[in-house]
Image (cartoon, grey):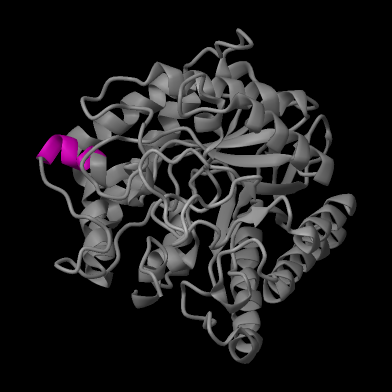
Amino acid sequence: MILDRRSFLVTTAGAAGALALAGCATGGEPGSQFVQRTGTRLTRGGQPYRIVGTNMWYAAWLGADADYGDRKRLVRELDRLQALGLNNLRIMAAAEEGPLSNSIKPGFTRADGSDNVALLEGLDFAIAESAKRGMTVVLALSNFWEWSGGLQTLLQRVTGSYIDMGDPAHPWPAFADSTAAFYANPGAVRLYLDHVRSIVGRTNSVTGMTYAEDPAIMSWQLANEPRPGGSDSAIAANRPAYLDWIAQSAELIRGIDDNHLVSLGQEGTQATNGSEELVTAAHQNIDYLTAHIWPLNWGWVAGDDLAGTWPDGKRKVEAYIDTHTRLAAAMDKPLVIEEFGFPRDREAYSPDTTTRFREQYYRVIYKAVEDSWRDDGPLQGSNFWAWNGEARARHADFRYRDGDRAYMGDPPHEPQGWYGNFDSDKAMLELASAHAARI
């Protein structure tokens, strides 16, 4: 199987200075249109806010008024999602250009650190159009993985050196251990915080509204899947700097914007090599917990034998949900399964391929969410990975090439069509729509 940012994963007390949040309401004033949390609940306008969402990392790229953008397509995709009943999008608000071989270009910041104004305005457009449809957005402010440049690129800008994910000369967990050195590098952290200040303090060029005043933003997310390392030794060594980075970043965001929630973007115990205690410590000063679930990439199922491996995979998925529901309840905070993905049948990529086992997987996630809604549990919703919409792979090998503009939920380094749902996936769309209707 093709190696990617996730398939490597199978081989694998609160920080000081931030606000203590347990048991209090955060995010705007009571009854406001900002998404808030009180205990394990998310609310909006004084009503429960239940998330039925998707990941659409590329929304800002489509929203850019540039040769790589396509605003008309973005509008069409948002209309489709609205018609399905989806109400939340998780999108990238950062991408760092640099030498890493698999990172998307252009980025929000150029290799010299300067801003890409067109892409920033594309983010403005995406947020404004989401708001028109009553949707909220979660904005990820960096990435642990290489496909958007991420923390490894920020390190490279300071140190001059880097490691490519998937480089045979640096097998797992070298990339994760190398990237996690970011947290203890003051220069790299400074570059990250500069971007945070710029985005959180931004005024939308389309609406004229500051981001801090925009209730269409649900949450600022520190990064996509930030890990303290890959090896046990690196995780132990990086722990203090990791927790300090979380505390410092959350405190900075709240100092600029006290209306919005702050999330970490962590996968859960998969990010900490099984340590529940470190997951809890990482979320002491964060508004809600997140979980990401990748059965194929974590070795819980085999793509060439889904029928034979799915029953055991299903049990592991259910156990992972149970673990993180328990952790959220113990912390009196909400939980969102903000990434969950599964291959098409036979691990094929074409939209013509059936999705029998993906449907079964989604039903497990959606049942857990609906049970929590019914029982007033901490699990507040989910975002499937990811939305492909009308995009189709441009090449027979299903690989992305620099210059391609058919953005889809599968990032550029992954097979195009691996995990995303297309607008032609009738069974999947009906399943998601039926789930949304149960809100």
Residues 101 and 93: in front is 101
- Residue 81 horizontal/vertical position (percent): 75, 42
- Check the image and name the residue furthest to the left: 160
Q: Quadrant of residue 108?
A: top left
Is residue 337 visible in the rendered image? The answer is no
Give yes or no for residue 156 being in the magenta stretch: yes
| Total numbered circles | 0
Q: Quadrant of residue 331?
A: bottom right
Vertical order, 159 against 273 (above or below): above
Give yes or no for residue 264 being in the magenta stretch: no
- Check the image and name the residue furthest to the top: 208
Seen at 30% across and 66% down, the residue is: 230
- Residue 44 horizontal/vertical position (percent): 78, 33
Vertical order, 227 against 344 (above or below): above
- Residue 262 horizontal/vertical position (percent): 54, 37
Residues 357 and 289: in front is 357
Seen at 33% across and 43% down, the residue is: 150
- Check the image and name the residue furthest to the front: 396
Q: Does residue 132 appear left or right of residue 282 in this picture?
A: right
Q: Does residue 195 appear left or right of residue 373 in this picture?
A: left
Vertical order, 337 against 231 (above or below): above
- Check the image and name the residue furthest to the bottom: 308
Quarter the N terminus occupies: bottom left
Q: What secondary structure characterizes most of the magenta part? A: helix
Q: Which residues are magenta?
A: 154-159
Q: Does residue 37 appear left or right of residue 164 in this picture?
A: right
Residues 247 and 357: in front is 357
Seen at 62% across and 59% down, the residue is: 328
- Residue 167 horizontal/vertical position (percent): 21, 63
Is residue 9 visible in the rendered image? The answer is yes
